[in-house]
Image: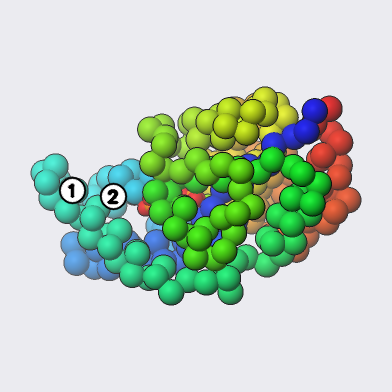
Amino acid sequence: KTPGFIFDLDGVIVDTAKYHYLAWKKLADELGIEFTKEDNERFKGVSRKRCLEILLEMGGIEASKEQFNAWLLEKNEDYLAYIETMDETEILPDVPKVLQYLRTNNIPMALGSASKNARPILEKVNLLSYFDTVVDGNEVSKAKPNPEVFLKASEKLGTKPEHCVVFEDALAGIEAANSAGMTSIGIGDAEILSNAKFNFIDFTEIDDDFLNTLLDGVGS
Ligand code: G16
Ligand code: MG
């Protein structure tokens, strides 16, 4: 049985975390909330709505529903302005190499992201065509570490969860993959992503041999 490969977007395929940070930082400054790059770590893989809830908790700010939604919109408009000029140069190292290898071997591939902007970003960096299906923040109601996003991706790929491999850069995403019963691969700091089945700093460390091991081991 052929395995299904599922990729997170931010932090795995492209580094949009820096743009999310700039947009949250701008809003935090306006609201008089201190917001550092370390704080931004907690926002990785987390839905936009949940991020704003955390930010307001940090500042001890209560907001009406209208105000809350206005700030959500403002953050997203700023974020969209930052990603407006994104292109292929922002793809993380060796990602196309891995996608191409899997495509050559006819491996079904899905995107599994918390972002509602996933599709336009994939279009900008010219990688949309690699994915058989895209499951993003518009389709899921339960955020990572809930496995909903990855279970939906495996369903759309027609591949059982135990035959799926997930590439993730966020702790919550690794937890989601593990509780879905999938093979989790942490991309980034192995100490932070210690519960991943395999760890790599980035895709430059992933070679064809390792991919072949996955193809043999997970699909059988
Ligand atoms: C990404 C980011 C999160 C971001 C979320 C929602 O998730 O890691 O920081 O808050 O998407 O993004 P948007 O505001 O564009 O809907 P992932 O799952 O791709 O890492
Ligand atoms: Mg991510």
129 is higher (above) or lower (below) than 78: above
Position of 153 with respect to 33 (left or right) is right
**Residue 196: horizontal and vertical position, in percent?**
67, 41
Question: What kind of residue is marked 2?
Answer: Leu
Position of 22 with respect to 101 (left or right) is left
Q: Quadrant of the N terminus?
A: top right
Task: Name the residue located 29 percent from the left edge and 66 percent from the top edge.
Answer: 78
Task: Name the residue located 38 percent from the left edge and 41 percent from the top edge.
Answer: 138
Quadrant assignment, res 160: top right
**What distance separates the C-alpha of mark 2 from that of mark 1?**
8 Å
The count of marks equals 2
Q: Upstream in the sequence, badge 2 or badge 1?
A: 2
93 vs 45, nearest the viewer: 93
- Give the secondary structure at mark 1: helix
Position of 62 with respect to 210 (left or right) is left
Q: Residues within 10 Å of mark 2 (few under 14, many from 20)?
A: many
Disc 2 and disc 1 in contact, CB within 8 angstroms: yes
42 vs 7, nearest the viewer: 7
Question: Label 2, on which residue?
Answer: 52
Query: Which disc is residue 68 wearing?
Result: 1
Q: Quadrant of the C terminus?
A: top right
**Residue 198: horizontal and vertical position, in percent?**
74, 44
Position of 2 with respect to 57 (left or right) is right
Residue 58 in view (yes/no) = no
- Give the secondary structure at mark 2: helix
Query: Which disc is residue 195 wearing?
Result: none
Task: Name the residue located 45 percent from the left edge and 66 percent from the top edge.
Answer: 18
Question: What kind of residue is marked 1?
Answer: Phe
